[in-house]
Image (spheres, rainbow, N blue to C red):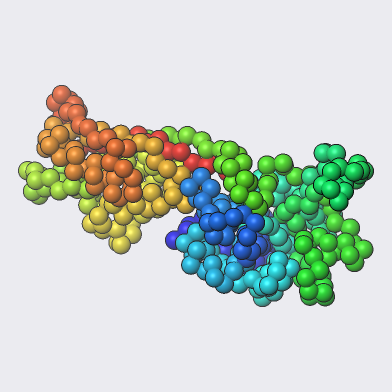
């Protein structure tokens, strides 16, 4: 399940009361039904990997995570359904039509069941749209029926003659390059699409312009490129920014009567067991909390409340796999994790390798990224008195900057 996409995708777009004010709802319609023939081999460009993640996953995520977007709906090609389900599990979609205009219309009609106040229409192949541009387009709709992200033309424009030579310099004053998102009051753009002749528009703003209704120009960021040609992917890879984040986890479980402890996913015979709601795998809990910490996602208790009977005696890899899933949703990767188990007994060293393997398997990463080591506390404190086991974990992750 893609947690980032699901809640908003299923949210019903209706007016809501927030601190006594009426808040206008905004849907994002992501147009991704094209075949991308110009981008060369490798299937539709919106499903090709960019920094290890499908382009569309990235684009959808930018809108799903934006605080002012209430619903995200993708318009996809019917043949791409499996690719979409894999790239954006759980996200809402409808099938597109014969061309872009038809696809947008079908998306708008799907939204019309629970009409939002505003809709932002965005190309699935523009995975670098910034949150500030999304905000600026939404803000412009307070004063205008439509608004589009655009860049002023700064290059000198040449007209080519029949021999392929520059034959004239064209005036560029007042010229802008239309990009997306293009935002509209929903009822306005739905009516415009319903009355437009088919195949007449390569963007949505032009439908309003044609009716003599100007659309506001919102200055865009030049990095909001559209991936069209094979060379665009090389540029895009250079535009991807990642950041390094670190998380720390600490956990303690007391000894109980029993004959084995579970540590790092491995059963280790011992004179005692560990007390806990789940399987009490103190090492895996510390690592899971480190990963949640690196993601600023709270801790195990927040995602798996100890009051919930479902997690009684649960194998702790359920928690670690969940944290790893959140990391994957963000396009993140674990760089490394280092776990220290603190106890007088049992001896950890003979079990460190199988623990590394079990942890790596739960995380879906190479064993070389996981370190497991142990120390005693020289007889001091609660671990020294053999009252329980403590574990510390630190991890480093690499995530795309969003
Ligand atoms: Mg614990």
Residue 88, horizontal then vertical, whole percent: 51, 60
Residue 13 appears left or right of 201 = left
| Residue 308 in picture, x, y percent from top left | 33, 59
**Observer able to see residue 102:** yes
Q: Is residue 20 visible?
A: no
Position in image of residue 306 (x %, y %)? 32, 54
The quarter of the displayed image where residue 69 is located: bottom right
Q: Which part of the image, by quadrant, shows the N terminus?
A: bottom left
* Residue nearer the viewer, 327 or 69: 327
Of 155 and 163, the residue lying toward us = 163
Residue depicted at x 44% and y 50%: 328
**Front-lying residue, 167 or 264:** 167
Question: In percent of the image, x 15 and y 34: which residue is there?
Answer: 349
Q: Please count the marks in the image.
A: 0
**Residue extending furthest toward the front:** 163
Residue drawn at point x = 48 percent, y = 57 percent = 3
Quarter occupied by residue 202: bottom right
Judge from the rendering whether residue 232 lies leftward or rightward of residue 276; answer left or right.
right
Query: 40 and 10: which one is in front?
Result: 40
Vertical comparison of 158 with 199: above or below: above
Residue at screen point 29% across, 45% down: 360
> How far across and down, in percent of the image, does residue 45 sit?
58, 56
Q: Quadrant of the C terminus?
A: top right
């Amino acid at each position: 399940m893609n947690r980032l996409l699901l809640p908003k995708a299923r949210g019903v777009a209706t007016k809501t009361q927030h601190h006594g004010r009426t808040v206008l709802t905004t849907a994002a319609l992501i147009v991704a039904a094209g075949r991308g023939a110009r981008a060369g081999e490798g299937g539709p460009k919106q499903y090709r990997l960019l920094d290890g993640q499908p382009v569309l996953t990235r684009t959808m995520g930018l809108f799903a995570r934006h605080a002012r977007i209430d619903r995200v709906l993708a318009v996809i090609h019917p043949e791409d359904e499996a690719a979409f389900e894999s790239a954006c599990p759980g996200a809402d979609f409808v099938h597109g039509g014969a061309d872009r205009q038809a696809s947008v219309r079908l998306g708008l009609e799907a939204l019309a069941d629970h009409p939002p106040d505003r809709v932002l229409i965005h190309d699935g192949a523009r995975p670098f749209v910034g949150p500030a541009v999304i905000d600026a387009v939404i803000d412009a709709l307070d004063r205008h029926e439509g608004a589009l992200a655009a860049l002023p033309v700064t290059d000198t424009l040449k007209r080519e003659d029949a021999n392929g030579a520059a034959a004239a310099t064209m005036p560029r004053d007042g010229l802008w390059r239309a990009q997306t998102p293009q935002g509209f009051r929903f009822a306005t753009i739905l009516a415009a699409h319903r009355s437009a002749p088919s195949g007449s528009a390569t963007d949505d703003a032009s439908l309003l312009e044609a009716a003599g209704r100007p659309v506001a120009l919102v200055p865009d960021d030049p990095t909001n490129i559209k991936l069209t040609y094979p060379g665009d992917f090389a540029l895009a890879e250079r535009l991807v920014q990642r950041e390094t984040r670190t998380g720390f986890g600490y956990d303690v479980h007391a000894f109980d009567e029993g004959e084995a402890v579970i540590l790092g996913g491995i059963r280790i015979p011992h004179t005692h067991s560990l007390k806990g709601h789940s399987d009490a795998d103190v090492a895996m809990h510390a690592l899971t909390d480190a990963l949640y910490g690196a993601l600023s996602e709270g801790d195990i208790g927040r995602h798996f409340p100890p009051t919930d009977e479902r997690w009684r005696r649960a194998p702790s890899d359920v928690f670690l796999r969940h944290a790893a899933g959140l990391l994957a949703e963000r396009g993140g990767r674990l760089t490394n994790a280092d776990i220290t188990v603190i106890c007088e007994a049992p001896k950890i060293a003979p079990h460190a390798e199988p623990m590394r393997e079990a942890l790596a398997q739960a995380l879906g990463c190479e064993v070389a990224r996981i370190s497991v080591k142990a120390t005693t506390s020289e007889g001091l404190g609660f671990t020294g008195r053999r009252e329980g086991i403590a574990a510390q974990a630190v991890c480093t992750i690499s995530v795309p900057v969003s």
